[in-house]
Image (tube, rainbow, N blue to C red):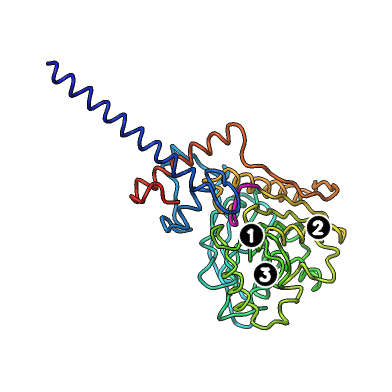
């Protein structure tokens, strides 16, 4: 039976060697994915960007391995009611909205959410940003209304902002129908939607209402003008989920006339008057071409006498909050936004001198978990697709 024992031992050795080779190969691949011209990426950021940029997954596909590896994210304990409907805007036109609201009598604070997507058809809608809207509704115990404003190329500026403002007015006038508090309305949005959200505060001020309680802007676009911004130069390749090409395309289609670029309702960074605006939370990402203009807008809001909080999240890319279910930094961003909204709605938001806060990548056990999850996701993706392990 010695020959059988020897075969068994050899099989064990072969299996161990194969396992070791796989582990080493995945580790080497992950190391290479983390190395970029703009700097070294955290492991979780690296695997997500590698997966998307190599078409291993699309932005609307869950790239996580089984829940036992990644855990959950966001949410809250109170079940939400959801309603999809259309609301009137200009003329006889109606646009879609999605409403999430808590169960109970209320009235609950209202948050108007404006999705990102470069102002262009096919780049984003109320479905692509549904996870953010659901999470905000649950974590802030608010009615959150996601607005499906019309987009370019069929509809140029100012259609998107006029649709958005009409939906805001509709929410104020019909708040009682969905247990909303018409006296407590905030706005929020990401990227192009961040632009629209802050434009809503300007339009509401200029048009005498509705009064906005607060604004939350995730990596907002704040200018259509050609100005010197370092982040636009070093992160414009598109690898970090937003390219110079897309930004120019958005400008060409949404604001086809150059005179539109200086309008305060497209480029709030250059607005002559930014006084008397609601408290703002502006969240930016380190690896994002829109980083510098978002932070410049935060400074200008503060200089105009407004309450402003701004946080730059290191080690992450444009759109990172949308990945809160698989990225710890995304969860941090959602938690910060939810806390800000809860405080502003309760009237307990404390004022403090403006200072850009820099949030480091996850540390301690969060970092250990992120590394382990990144390794598991990398192995999962590579095993599923059979791509070259060492292809950066």
Q: Earlier in the sequence, mark 2 or mark 1?
A: 1
Would you call the spot at circle 3 few (<14 residues within 10 Å), some (14-19), or many (20 or more)? some
Q: Earlier in the sequence, mark 3 or mark 1?
A: 3
Which dot, 2 or 1, sits closer to the camera? 1
On-image quarter of the N terminus: top left
In the rendering, at what x and y percent does residue 239 appear? Answer: 54, 59
Q: Is residue 235 visible?
A: yes
Q: Distance between the residues labelled 3 and 1?
A: 41 Å
Magenta residue span: 314-319
Q: Main secondary structure of the magenta part?
A: strand
In the rendering, at what x and y percent does residue 328 appear? Answer: 58, 43
The residue under label 1 is 234
In the rendering, at what x and y percent does residue 24 appear? Answer: 40, 36
Quick check: is 300 in the magenta stretch? Answer: no
Would you call the spot at circle 2 few (<14 residues within 10 Å), some (14-19), or many (20 or more)? some
Would you call the spot at circle 1 few (<14 residues within 10 Å), some (14-19), or many (20 or more)? few
In the rendering, at what x and y percent does residue 281 appear? Answer: 73, 54
The residue under label 3 is 170
Q: Earlier in the sequence, mark 2 or mark 3?
A: 3
Question: Looking at the rendered structure, which numbered label has been put on residue 337?
Answer: none
Above or below, 111 against 34 in this view is below
Q: How many marks?
A: 3
Who's the residue at 61% across and 47% down the image? Answer: 315
**Residue 164 shown left or right of residue 268 in the figure:** left
Disc 3, SS:
helix
Above or below, 47 against 119 in this view is above
Q: Distance between the residues labelled 2 and 1?
A: 22 Å
Disc 1, SS:
helix
Above or below, 108 against 195 in this view is above
């Amino acid at each position: 039976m010695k020959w059988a024992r020897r075969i068994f031992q050899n099989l064990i050795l072969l299996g161990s060697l194969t396992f070791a080779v796989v582990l080493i190969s995945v580790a080497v691949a992950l190391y290479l994915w983390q190395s970029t011209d703009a700097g070294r990426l955290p492991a979780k950021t690296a695997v997500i960007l590698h997966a998307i940029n190599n078409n291993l997954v699309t932005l609307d596909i869950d790239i996580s391995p089984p829940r036992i590896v990644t855990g959950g994210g966001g949410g809250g304990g109170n079940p939400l009611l959801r309603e999809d409907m259309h609301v009137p805007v200009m003329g006889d036109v109606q646009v879609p909205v999605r409403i999430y609201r808590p169960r109970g009598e209320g009235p609950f604070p209202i948050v108007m959410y404006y999705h990102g997507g470069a102002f262009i058809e096919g780049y984003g809608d109320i479905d692509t940003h549904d996870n953010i809207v659901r999470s905000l509704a649950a974590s802030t115990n608010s009615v959150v209304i996601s607005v499906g404003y019309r987009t370019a190329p069929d509809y140029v500026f100012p259609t998107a902002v006029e649709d958005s403002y009409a939906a805001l007015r509709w929410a104020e006038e019909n708040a009682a129908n969905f247990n909303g508090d018409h006296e407590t309305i905030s706005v929020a949005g990401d990227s192009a939607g961040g632009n629209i959200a802050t434009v809503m505060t300007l339009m509401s001020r200029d048009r005498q209402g509705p009064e906005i309680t607060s604004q939350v802007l995730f990596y907002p676009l704040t200018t259509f003008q050609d100005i010197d911004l370092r982040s636009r130069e070093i992160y414009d390749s598109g690898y970090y989920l937003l390219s110079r090409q897309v930004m120019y395309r958005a400008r060409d289609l949404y604001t086809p006339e150059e005179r539109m670029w200086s309008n305060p309702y497209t480029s709030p960074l250059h607005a002559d008057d930014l006084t008397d605006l609601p408290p703002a939370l502006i969240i930016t990402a380190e690896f994002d071409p829109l980083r510098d203009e978002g932070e410049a807008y935060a400074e200008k809001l503060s200089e105009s006498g407004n309450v402003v909080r701004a946080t730059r999240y290191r080690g992450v890319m444009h759109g990172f909050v949308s990945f809160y279910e698989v990225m710890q930094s995304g969860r941090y961003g959602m938690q910060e936004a939810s806390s800000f909204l809860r405080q502003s709605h309760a009237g307990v938001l404390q004022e403090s001198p403006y200072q850009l806060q820099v949030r480091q990548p996850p540390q301690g056990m969060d970092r250990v978990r992120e590394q382990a999850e990144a390794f598991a996701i990398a192995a999962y993706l590579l095993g599923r697709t059979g791509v070259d392990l060492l292809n950066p």
